[in-house]
Image (cartoon, rainbow, N blue to C red):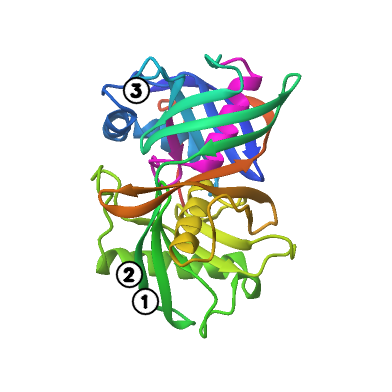
């Protein structure tokens, strides 16, 4: 019978939750975070469901667990946990995790202001700005991101046939831009976007295969990114990113923004170094940039950066006690 208490620090990144498990995380086997992610999914997934699903979490909940780095040149390694599973990479999760870890003294980087973080998807180089105890902003240099497919089509309930591109930014995103049958996310409710996303994500994955060229454990189109007109005319764009089963990201989504910048760059709509100000469904903002142009397994790719902020708001001792609670491991409705 499992009975365990986890010490968590709760924060949000531009409105989207980050629950960092600071005490109670399991020891994992593997020589990289990608291998450790597989071990966690095989043996410890109850920790994720218990901490992310209702009644201890909710549809949007996401979090992370810190590990020592595998390469001594790096500062930390991170496992991302959320309602849909363990993401290879999470941008809002990184901004929240680094803010918590620095403010709470869970991490002392070798070079103050810089963190070299191992994620399952690869090495992330982070710069953060601090004022006193507070971390004011976090900028992460993400994994190489690329446009994987263009101009695919899928039938969507209510809307009809939709065109979309698929891009990788640490996860694979179907990006649905305004078009004849979809006027933009601002014309729809979150509930409508969620209902359509559930259907079309399944249809897309039934019809197509997306696999990372260097790590086959990263596969499948996990997120749907609806785009539309920004609220602030000075912003470059706005998105609503669907993840898990019922979530619309409250932040502009770091890996989603990376994927969208890869799409824009490939189509000549964004230049290297130019700021890409991305608004979320609730209007919060990340600033992205194409830092470098590179290639991934012979395909053109970009190295994107994402900058945003997070706020720590609580400390949470969370008990998962199988003997005492029929919902110890969470539930989804
Ligand atoms: O910020 O990369 C992100 C993210 C992925 C899912 C939710 N947020």
- Tell me the quadrant of the picture where the N terminus can be found: top left
Q: Nearer the viewer, mark 2 or mark 3?
A: 2
Distance of label 2 from label 1 (alpha carbons): 7 Å
Please state the extent of the stretch shown in magenta in the rendering: 78-106
Residue 248 against residue 267 in the figure, above or below: above
Residue indicated by mark 3: 1
Mark 2 and mark 1 lie on one chain; the one further toward the N terminus is 1
Q: Nearer the viewer, residue 291 or 304?
A: 291
Q: Residue at position x 54%, y 16% from top?
A: 109
Are dots 2 and 1 in contact, CB under 8 Å?
A: yes
Task: Residue 129: give its label.
Answer: none
Q: Position of residue 301 (x, y in %)?
A: 38, 52
Q: Nearer the viewer, residue 85 or 300?
A: 300
Indicate the secondary structure of the residue bearing disc 3: loop
Q: Position of residue 263 (x, y in %)?
A: 45, 62
Are dots 2 and 3 in contact, CB under 8 Å?
A: no
Residue indicated by mark 1: 154
Q: Residue at position x 39%, y 43% from top?
A: 85
Q: Is residue 61 visible?
A: no
Residue indicated by mark 2: 203
Residue 39 against residue 74 in the figure, above or below: below
Q: Residues within 10 Å of mark 2 (few under 14, many from 20)?
A: some
Q: Residue at position x 68%, y 30% from top?
A: 312
Distance of label 2 from label 3 (alpha carbons): 39 Å
Question: Is residue 156 a member of the stretch shown in magenta?
Answer: no
Indicate the secondary structure of the residue bearing disc 2: helix
Mark 2 and mark 3 lie on one chain; the one further toward the N terminus is 3
Q: Position of residue 236 (x, y in %)?
A: 64, 61
Would residue 38 be found to the left or right of residue 106 on screen? left
Mark 3 and mark 1 lie on one chain; the one further toward the N terminus is 3
Indicate the secondary structure of the residue bearing disc 1: strand
């Amino acid at each position: 019978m499992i009975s365990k208490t986890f010490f968590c620090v709760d924060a949000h990144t531009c409105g989207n939750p980050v629950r960092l498990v600071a005490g109670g995380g399991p020891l994992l086997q593997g020589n990289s975070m990608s291998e450790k992610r597989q071990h966690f999914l095989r043996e410890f997934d109850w920790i994720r469901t218990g901490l992310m699903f209702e009644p201890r979490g909710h549809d949007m909940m996401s979090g992370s667990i810190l590990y020592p780095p595998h390469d001594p040149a790096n500062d930390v390694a991170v496992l991302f946990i959320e309602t849909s599973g363990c993401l290879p990479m999470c941008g809002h999760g990184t901004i929240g995790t680094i803010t918590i870890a620095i403010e709470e003294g869970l991490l002392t980087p070798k070079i103050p202001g810089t963190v070299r973080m191992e994620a399952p998807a690869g090495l992330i180089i982070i710069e953060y700005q601090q004022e006193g105890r507070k971390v004011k902003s976090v900028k992460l240099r993400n994994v190489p991101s690329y446009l994987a497919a263009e101009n695919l089509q899928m039938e969507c309930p209510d809307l009809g046939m939709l065109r979309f591109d698929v891009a990788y930014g640490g996860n694979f995103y179907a990006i649905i831009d305004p078009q004849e049958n979809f006027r933009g996310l601002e014309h729809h409710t979150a509930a409508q976007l969620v209902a359509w996303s559930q259907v079309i994500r399944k249809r897309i994955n039934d019809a197509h295969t997306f696999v990372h060229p260097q790590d086959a454990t990263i596969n499948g189109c996990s997120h749907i990114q609806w785009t539309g007109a920004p609220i602030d005319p000075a912003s470059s764009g706005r998105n609503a990113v669907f993840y898990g089963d019922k979530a619309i990201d409250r932040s502009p989504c770091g890996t989603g923004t990376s994927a969208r910048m890869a799409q824009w760059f490939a189509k000549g709509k964004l230049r290297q170094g130019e700021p890409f100000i991305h608004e979320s469904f609730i209007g919060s903002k990340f600033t992205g940039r194409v830092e470098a142009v590179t290639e991934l397994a012979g395909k053109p790719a970009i190295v994107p950066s994402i900058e945003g902020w997070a706020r720590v708001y609580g400390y949470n001792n969370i008990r998962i006690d199988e003997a005492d609670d029929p919902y110890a491991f969470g539930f989804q409705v």
